[in-house]
Image: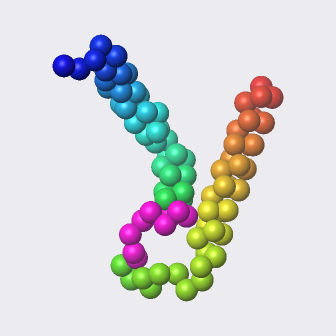
Amino acid sequence: MPSPHTKPLRRAVRWLLPAAALALAPKCLLCVLAYTGLATALGLVGPELCGPPASPHPGTTFLAFLGVICGSGYILAIARRKFLHR
């Protein structure tokens, strides 16, 4: 017999999982591009069809990740400046 505390926990998980999925879903083209760049930088994409199977330089993943971070920071700074000075 399940304890009385498991039912509220299951209910919370049933509500939180779809809410988290909706919060992480890309809502605009910029979000899709940011998620794609982040996945590429972290190496979560498959091998290229017409390129080499792996990067010859181990630092290229770090540089790609750094580029995503810097680009995202720039976009956030521009958006913040635009919306705060209205």
- Tell me residue 32's x, y (percent): 48, 49
- What residue do we see at 23% from left, 20% from top? 2
Q: Is residue 59 visible?
A: yes
Decide if residue 11 is in sight here. Answer: no
Count of numbered marks: 0
Question: As displayed, is residue 86 above or below residue 32?
Answer: above
> Bounds of the magenta span?
40-48
Picture coordinates of residue 27, whole percent (x, y): 47, 38
For residue 42: magenta?
yes
Which residue in the rendered view is the most extreme toward the left? 1
Instruction: Check the image and report above or below for 78 versus 1.
Output: below
Pick the residue in front: 25 or 17.
17
Give the position of the C terminus as an image quadrant.
top right
- Residue at image location 52% in from the left, 46% down from the top: 31
- Main SS of the magenta segment? loop
Q: Residue at x 69, y 43 (%)?
A: 76
Locate residue 64 relative to residue 27 in the image: left or right: right
